[in-house]
Image: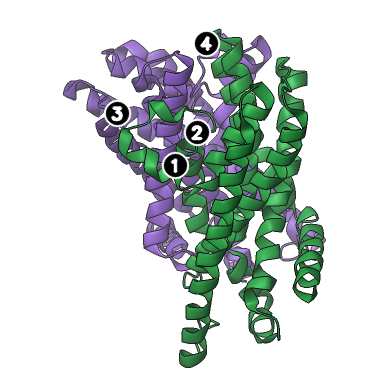
Amino acid sequence: MHALRVLGWGWVFHAKMMTRSAFDGLLAVLWPLFFATVAFFMFRNGGNPELLVYAALGAAVMGVWTATSVPASSALQRARWHGVLELLVATPVHFSLVLLPVTIATSAIGLYCLAATILWGKFAFGIDLPMEHPFAFALAVPATVISVGMLGFLLAVAFVRFRRSWAMGAVLEYPVWLICGFLVPLSLLPDWVRPISWALGPTWGMNAIRQASMGGTPLPDVAICFALGLGYVAAGVLMLNSVLRSAREHATLALT
Amino acid sequence: MTYALRVFFVGGLTSYRALFGWLSPSILLTTLFATPIFQILLFAYIGRTAKLENDEFYVIGNAIQYVSIPCVFGMVQMISGERYAQTLAFVLVTPAGRLPLFLGRAFPVVLNGAAVAVVSFGVAALLLDVGVRPSSLPSLLAVAVLASFSCTGFGLVLAGIGLRVRETSVMNNIVFGLLLIFTGSNVRLDRLPDWMQAIGGSMPLTHAITAGREVADGASLADVTGLLAWEAALGAVYMLAGYAFLIFMETQSRRRATLEIS
């Protein structure tokens, strides 16, 4: 119960802070819209209306990853800048309970972008999304957001030793857009890319959202997406324990 | 004269090296050279999915469009980086002429932008098996340098705005997104609405991208003189406007004491 309170309030505080940041809030919504606009023009010129729906859903989910990749990768560095990293690490609760709500708050900002992209597609390009399984859609979206936030948690821990971790997150933005099948079917990518795609939660989340909207069996994809997210958290906690032990032993938490 | 040249070359080089002070070379190089390759791959695969253009179209379009990252970000960072390091006031209080001071800082950015276009084009062309005749490569290099020049001029205008705007990184990213849409880097200009074509025609990179595609298809530089002249003229206008705007904003910043607080 105590852990859930830490997670819940941590999420609320960080989500509120991010919505007031021009970079984390406004730009996270606008940035994928630029790419969505280009993609909509490309698919519209292609003349296949079904692909336009495919692109609208993919572009909408792209924003969830965009909202997560840079802010989550740099979450610990941001805490360093604010001078609170040592205090947060020293709190009695496990540090993962402090960090996880931060990264899930970043991916939750992507919900703004998801909604904005769907509305942009509808009003600017006349794309009406079908909704074959509305309840599954309502389940798939939060599951994808949480799973992406969990992947962000793993990134945040993995990049703890990098002073410029935001740049690492920025470099990962396009590759994940590409290999998770947001705008390009996985079947078009080289064979060796597919196992990497399958190991990424956003791939399954994207599948689930598409099948919930366009028809199919979304629930297994939702389950895989969420299970992968839990796997990222487990790996992140193990890595975090090791990193914190090393930082305490060598007094390198501040990276100064 | 010698003094002005020193400010131009030494000041420009020092300022450019300062970019590596706030961002380590490995990270900067990854950002500048790896990211555009992924952007090219992304749009090339979207193009394959939509069954629109061939890969060469996206390789050329995105390699040239990506010069906006080093050029726009580099020029705005000229102001915001100095402010972050608390050296902006010292730079602007010097008696150095503003022409060599600002244009000297733009010169390495032009070369950097061209290098980004060339490397990302080369690597992406290899990855996607895009063949361009070797005889076209020098012409493509000239197009890349010209695109970088015009975009740096545009960046100089934005650097002036950076004297008053706090969230420069947000502004830069929005500008990058607008260039992605309006320059025809991924959608042929004639497939865009008329009003978008009109805006695109007045933006940097648009004519260079079209010229680059024609050169890659076998045209000579002489064949695309009109496009290159437009790009060069736009670059010169932006460069002069940016210089004048910087002088104006500097004066305003002194008058309103907003140099450090904006």
Marks 3 and 4 share the same chain = no
Q: Which mark is residue B128?
A: 3
Q: Position of residue B197 (x, y in %)?
A: 60, 15
Look at the numbered discs 2 and 1 and tell me whether their residues touch, using CB distance below 8 Å: yes
Q: CA distance from mark 2 to mark 1?
A: 8 Å
Mark 4 vs mark 2, CA separation in Å: 18 Å
Quick one: SS at disc 4?
helix
Identify residue for label 2.
A181
Could you tell me which residue is drawn at 62 percent across and 65 percent down?
A: A75
Bin the neighbour count of mark 3 within 10 Å (Cα to Cα): few under 14, some 14-19, many 20 and up: some
Give the image location of residue B147, x and y in percent. Answer: 43, 31
* Label 4 vs 2, first from the N-terminus: 4
The chain identifier of the residue carrying mark 1 reads: A
Q: Amino acid at mark 1?
A: Ser
Chain in purple (letter): B
Quarter holding the N terminus of chain A is bottom right
Q: Amino acid at mark 4?
A: Gly
Mark 2 closeness class: few <14, some 14–19, many ≥20 residues within 10 Å: many
